[in-house]
Amino acid sequence: MSDLPLAAVERLIRKAGAERVSEDAAEALADVLEEYALSIGQKAVLLAKHAGRKTITGRDIKLASRG
């Protein structure tokens, strides 16, 4: 189970064009989003450490999401 609020995930799916969203669809997307976000976060930590910083910046996140 994801830590992301299901209502927010459901809004994202609706924003993508869905008229109706089942609870299991919102839960499944929340799980995928959390896994992806954790991966990006881990890469961003490595980028910041490589740059000699402890603080993660928006640029770290953007760079980490590219590769």
Image (cartoon, rainbow, N blue to C red):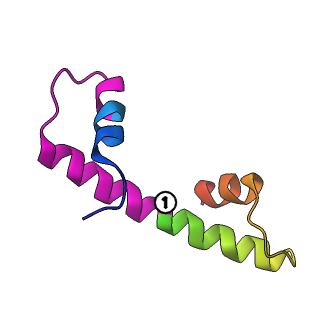
Residue under the point 13% across and 49% down: 24
From the top left corner, tell me how far across and down residue 8 is, in percent.
Answer: 36, 39
- Give above or below for 28 relative to 1: above
Q: Residues within 10 Å of mark 1 (few under 14, many from 20)?
A: some
How many labels, in total? 1
Magenta-span inclusion, residue 31? yes
* Residue annotated with mark 1: 37
Q: Quadrant of residue 18?
A: top left
Instruction: Characterize the magenta stretch by its predominant secondary structure.
Output: helix
43 relative to 60 in the view: left or right? left
Residue under the point 34% across and 49% down: 5
**Considering depth in this image, is 57 or 43 the residue closer to the camera?**
57
Q: Quadrant of the C terminus?
A: bottom right
Magenta-span inclusion, residue 20? yes
Q: Quadrant of the N terminus?
A: bottom left
Q: As shown in the figure, which amino acid type bears the numbered disc 1? A: Ala
From the top left corner, tell me how far across and down residue 35 is, in percent.
Answer: 39, 64
**Considering depth in this image, is 57 or 62 the residue closer to the camera?**
57
Residue under the point 81% across and 78% down: 50
- Give above or below for 34 relative to 55: above
Residue segment shown in magenta:
13-37
From the top left corner, tell me how far across and down residue 4 is, in percent.
Answer: 37, 54
- Give above or below for 67 relative to 27: below
- Give above or below for 4 relative to 38: above
21 relative to 2 in the view: left or right? left
Q: Quadrant of residue 10?
A: top left
Q: Secondary structure at mark 1?
A: helix
Residue under the point 59% across and 55% down: 65
67 relative to 53 in the view: left or right? left
From the top left corner, tell me how far across and down residue 28 is, in percent.
Answer: 22, 53
